[in-house]
Amino acid sequence: MTTVITYGTFDLFHVGHVRLLKRLRALGDRLIVACSTDEFNAIKGKKAIFSYEDRAEILSACTYVDLVIPERNWEQKPDDIRTHKADIFAMGDDWAGRFDYLGTETGCIVTYVARTPDISTTDIKGVMRRIDEDRLQSIRNMVEGLRAELSKY
Ligand code: C2G
């Protein structure tokens, strides 16, 4: 039984997350995902749209995920790897090199898989913000039009 473990926020669950989890699950027989709590996200300087509970529920519903645990700090990884007898620690390659020490410290394999280009939670938030701004502008134009009409009377 080969166990893979990974960590992340997984906010606004998207195809980049799905492909990552699919790739990681294919490395072994079981995939554990440590999902960043809202408190830890604050430490990471991130504010997720979805709560930890919702993000954990969405991850649990993903066919590639066998177990979801909370990620509360940067330091818990070695203990998690030992507790869950993880054979492989894996992340998207935007983290390449950052967790190599885990291999030395715990004896697990550390690997990084290709990140899916052109999609990220940040991009999705940006699109949502632009939709809001576009809608706001169209309301402003409508009010301007009405005001112009009313000024004729
Ligand atoms: N990811 C990906 N492709 C994307 C977006 C994300 O493969 N288009 C991967 C990232 O490389 C990461 C995982 O999905 O391995 C989760 O990404 P985030 O939710 O952004 O997590 P992050 O903020 O990187 O937190 O202790 C580690 C941290 O908790 C990682």
Image (tube, rainbow, N blue to C red):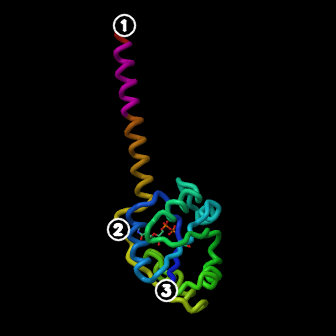
Label 3 to label 2, Cα distance in Å? 28 Å
Determine if the C-beta at disc 3 is less than 8 A from ligand 1.
no
Q: Give the percent coordinates (x, y) of residue 6.
A: 51, 75
Location of residue 123 by image quarter: bottom left
Q: Nearer the viewer, residue 47 or 27?
A: 27
Badge 3 is on which residue?
A: 2
Total number of numbered discs in the rendering = 3
Q: Earlier in the sequence, mark 2 or mark 1?
A: 2
- The kind of secondary structure element at disc 1 is loop
The kind of residue on which mark 3 rests is Thr
Q: Image point 44% across, 81% down: which residue? A: 112
Badge 2 is on which residue?
A: 117
Q: Earlier in the sequence, mark 3 or mark 2?
A: 3
Callout 2 crowding tier (Cα within 10 Å): few <14, some 14–19, many ≥20: few
Q: Is residue 152 above or below residue 91?
A: above
Badge 1 is on which residue?
A: 153
Does the magenta segment cover residue 30?
no
The kind of residue on which mark 2 rests is Pro
Callout 3 crowding tier (Cα within 10 Å): few <14, some 14–19, many ≥20: few
Does the magenta segment cover residue 145?
yes
Most common SS among magenta residues: helix
The kind of residue on which mark 1 rests is Tyr
Q: Nearer the viewer, residue 84 or 77?
A: 84
User: Range of the magenta residues?
Assistant: 138-150
Q: Image point 40% across, 29% down: which residue? A: 140
